[in-house]
Image: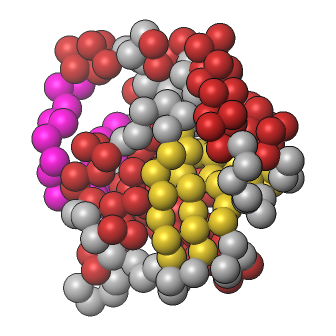
Amino acid sequence: MTELWLVRHGQTDWNLNGIYQGQQDVPLNETGVAQARTLAEHLRGTPFSTIYSSDLLRAHQTALLLAEVLQVPVRTDPRLREIKQGVWEGKTIDYVRETYHPDFSPNPKYLTTPRAEGAESLADVIRRMIDAANEYFARHNGERILLSTHGLSAAVLYCAAQGIPLVEAGHHIPENARPLIINLKAPMPLPDFLLPNT
């Protein structure tokens, strides 16, 4: 078994102001730094083998703050990035609602169809997150590792591991610097809707 702790990065000013970050490189704000340090102290004494981090600044900063206390190496992996939001990135939620009129309800259409021009779909995100998780399972079987990642990326992996419908992933986005824990006993299969001939 491999124990995966999925940690959403600490708060950023864009989180605070309701701005879509996607894959924009936004740093932690003072609150985000404090959140990461608080989590690190909470985890002090819990053994981890390593930390894998998204290469985006906010997640990498979070990982480095955790690593100072946990005394483990940090390895970056772009597969752990947040969903790419295309033309919505840098725009407020209110602007997106007024301009693009998106359907934010849990909708199977958006499993494979990006919501914004130039964006990823949930299918794109879950493919790369499962690929990363299965690689870590093979490399760290019997160990506990931490993934410093992003809200929706953590949520889709958690839902896939727990058998929760991926259309509900938006309801499982963790708060900043709050972990979700997955116990992998075997490599994760792709969800049925991503398999050929289904």
- In-image side of 88 versus 107 (left or right): right
Q: Examine the rendering and report whether any part of residue 84 can be seen.
A: no
For the rendered model, the colour scheme is: secondary structure
What x and y, as percent, mark residue 183? 49, 71
Quarter of the figure with residue 24:
top right
Q: Is residue 137 visible?
A: yes
Q: Which residues are magenta?
A: 99-116
Quadrant location of the C terminus in the rendered image? bottom left
Q: Is residue 165 magenta?
A: no
Write down the quadrant of residue 118 in the picture.
Answer: top left
Residue 107 falls left or right of residue 138:
left
**What is the x, y in percent for residue 87?**
43, 29
Q: Is 111 within the magenta? A: yes
The front one of 45 and 51 is: 45
Spot occupied by residue 197 in the image (x, y as percentages of width and height): 26, 89
Q: Name the residue located 41 percent from the left edge and 45 percent from the top edge.
A: 152
Asked if 90 appears above or below 83 in the picture, the reply is above
Secondary structure, magenta segment, majority class: loop
Q: Position of residue 136 (x, y in %)?
A: 67, 72
Task: Point out the residue furthest to the front here.
Answer: 45
Q: How many marks?
A: 0
> In the picture shown, does residue 50 fall above or below 97?
below
Relative horizontal placement of residue 13, taking residue 88 as reference (left or right): right
Image quadrant holding the N terminus, namely bottom right
Foreground pick, 195 / 159: 159
Residue at image point 54% right, 22% down: 11
- Which residue corresponds to the image point at 18% horizontal and 36% vertical from the top-left? 104
Task: Please report the residue visible at 15 percent of the width from the left and 51 percent of the height from the top.
Answer: 107
Residue located farthest toward the bottom when viewing the structure as drawn: 197
